[in-house]
Image: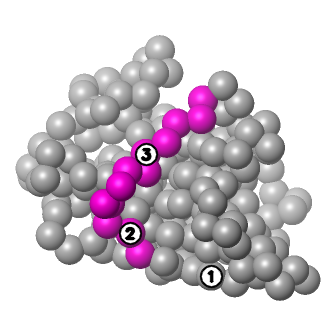
Amino acid sequence: MSKIKYSIEARAYDIIGLAAHDFWVLRNEKGNVLGQLHGLATNTENRIKPIGTIGDKLKFYHFGSRAILLGLNPNCDLNYIKAGQKSKLMFSESSDAVLDRWDNAVKALPYLNSLDVPYTPFGILGLAHVNSNTAYTLLGQLMGIPVHNFSGCWQPGCRNADKILTSSQLEIMRYPQDLSDIDFA
């Protein structure tokens, strides 16, 4: 097993000082970003939108050099990391241990996207929000790492992962399950 330390961090993308879009970042031993995992509002033409509206879907994305290496999103290397963002290191271990967790979540992305989960429009109060923060929570659970709740900003949808997967589905898909023989498609 590799002794090189990789890490997974939670990050919060500020939305006009009121709310946050939470996401995951994979870094190598030098601190370079290898990947980002996001849930984003996506319209019927499969275009990512900054704010979801009626009819949009929550789609799961993997960006960065690791995504390109794995043949995912080769034409789309978006970066949501900005200077001064809130971030928290959530898991650091050998490269093998970190990549096992990260890749567990990545393997689930095609299945999650096949669910055509409706995106809660505009973060309307009173609704059971299903949005980017729901995806953040679910992806953290799939990696088997704690989900950090950033203080000082509204994070609607963080606690609604059960609106996408049942607890039994999550248990089957959660790291460290052996998913080598499971086809999520």
Which amino acid, mark 3?
Tyr
Q: What kind of secondary structure does the magenta stretch mostly adopt? A: loop
Whichever of callouts 3 and 2 sits on the residue coming sooner in the sequence is 3
Which amino acid, mark 2?
Ser
Nearer to us in this view, 70 or 114 = 70
Q: Is residue 62 above or below residue 138?
A: above
Residue farthest to the left, as pictured:
125
| Residue 116 x %, y % | 49, 35
Indicate the secondary structure of the residue bearing disc 3.
Answer: loop
The CA distance from mark 3 to mark 2 is 12 Å
| Residue 120 x %, y % | 26, 40
Indicate the secondary structure of the residue bearing disc 1.
Answer: strand
Whichever of callouts 2 and 1 sits on the residue coming sooner in the sequence is 2
Instruction: For residue 150, say whether it is visible.
Output: yes
The CA distance from mark 2 to mark 1 is 14 Å
Nearer to us in this view, 75 or 125 = 75
Instruction: For residue 157, say whether it is visible.
Output: no
Which region shows up in magenta?
Answer: 76-88
Identity of the residue drawn at 37% across and 51% down: 82
Check disc 2 and report the residue beneath it: 87
Indicate the secondary structure of the residue bearing disc 2.
Answer: strand
Say left or right for 166 vs 120. Answer: right
Say left or right for 4 vs 58. Answer: right
Identity of the residue drawn at 31% across and 60% down: 84
Nearer to us in this view, 84 or 116 = 84
**Mark 2 packing: few (<14 Cα in 10 Å), some, or many (20+)?**
some
Quarter of the view holding residue 122? top left
Quick check: marks 3 and 2 in contact, CB under 8 Å?
no
**Mark 1 packing: few (<14 Cα in 10 Å), some, or many (20+)?**
some
Check disc 1 and report the residue beneath it: 92
Identity of the residue drawn at 60% across and 57% down: 33
Check disc 3 and report the residue beneath it: 80
